Image (cartoon, rainbow, N blue to C red):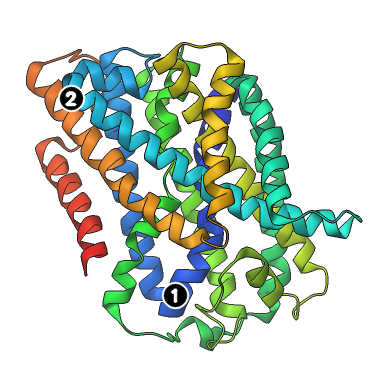
Amino acid sequence: MNTKLLGSALIISGTALGAGMLAIPMVLAQFGLWYGTSLMIFICFGTTYAALLLLEASLKTGSGLGLNSIARKTLGKPGQVVTNLLLYALLICLLMAYILGAADLFAELSSIIGFSLSSQHSQIVFTLVSGIIIACGTGAVDKLNRALFFIMIASLAISLVILLPDIRFTNLTHAVSSDKTELIKTSTVLFTSFGFMVVIPSLVAYNHEADDKQLRNMVILGSMIPLICYLSWLFAVVGNLRPDQLGQFSNVSELILAFEDTSPWIGTILSVFTGLALLTSFFGVAMSLYNQNRDMFSQNRFVTYVLTFILPLVGALLAADQFLAVLSYAGIILVFLAVFIPLTMVYVIRRYGLEPMRYQAEGGKVMLLFSLGFGVFLIASQLL
């Protein structure tokens, strides 16, 4: 795998490794390590296969197209409208969640270096400055994301090394809650934590010279890295925190503060780690929305910049302290956009034999039925 493809796999991983690193301990640790791990692996498998379906649709309709154009070519005008509505709702919700999480950390960092910024000012500064990087193009995002991603992984590794000696193994088998219904209800938040599919059309266009097998491996590698990081992080949280603390966090700062009894400076490392996790996710999602707006409206960079960032910023300013709620809403939308839409696209493509020589996701009809059942499971988890 060349450097460009590796960078693209890291964009996939970075897009997933954002809100999930913050949300997973808040919603999953209370159910214990075994059940949390099993559910996370199942969600990762279903999500990765849905991403491979979207990759198939992207390649068979013409590499370089945005989701708007792919939907038009496979689902017609009605399907294009529905896809665009779902995509905009999803990306705006995700950007709102990332802005809320990042601004909390940004305000804390500014206070450490002597500046006092309100939550609203932190959200505005973070969004507008980060948006400039997105407007510079996918290549710029790729290069910056590689550096940030390796620093983020190094921060995670250092954090795990510090926390490992204090892990209480009795905690790993202990579950504060044994309510399996409540556990299943966390499925859409976990699904959102692997929500990298929106970047696939942009990365297929960016890697136009790569063959189908390389792109497939890029998607699989990009999805495996978040799984390993999430499981390591969940292990550290469950092993270090008291059972009565699990499930009691409402924001990023509270989660980080809970670890400061272990080491007075681990809070700084975790702030760097969670901040970079949110930033890489923000880049991936914002890049998808920016390219979608370019594909749909065909405007210059300034107009596309305004269309991309103003609405999520306004939403974040109006949704203070609603990080997990916004992430949950995004999860419900993502089920339709990232499971049912690619599934329908691929069904149409295979039925009418479009580009049969291009990549086809493995498993045939059996796996298509699995993907349908996976989407139904995620919807049902919210109706329990």
Which residue is located at x 63 percent, y 70 percent? 255
Left or right of 128? Residue 355 is left
Q: Is residue 197 above or below residue 107?
A: above
Which residue is located at x 59 percent, y 15 percent? 301
Which residue is located at x 18 percent, y 38 percent? 363
Q: Nearer the viewer, residue 300 or 167?
A: 300
Question: Do we see residue 208 in this rendering?
Answer: yes
Whole-percent x and y of residue 22? 56, 61
Whole-percent x and y of residue 263? 79, 75
Q: Tag 2 or tag 1, which sits nearer the N-term? A: 1
Q: Which mark is residue 172?
A: none
Whole-percent x and y of residue 54? 30, 30
Q: CA distance from mark 1 to mark 2?
A: 44 Å
Q: Is residue 134 above or below residue 302?
A: below
Which residue is denoted by mark 1 in the rendering? 33
Q: Quadrant of residue 274?
A: bottom right
Identity of the residue furthest to the right in this view: 114
Q: Amino acid at mark 1?
A: Leu
Number of disc labels: 2
Mark 1 residue element:
helix
Which residue is denoted by mark 2 in the rendering? 78
Q: Quadrant of residue 350?
A: top left
Question: Do we see residue 17 in this rendering?
Answer: no
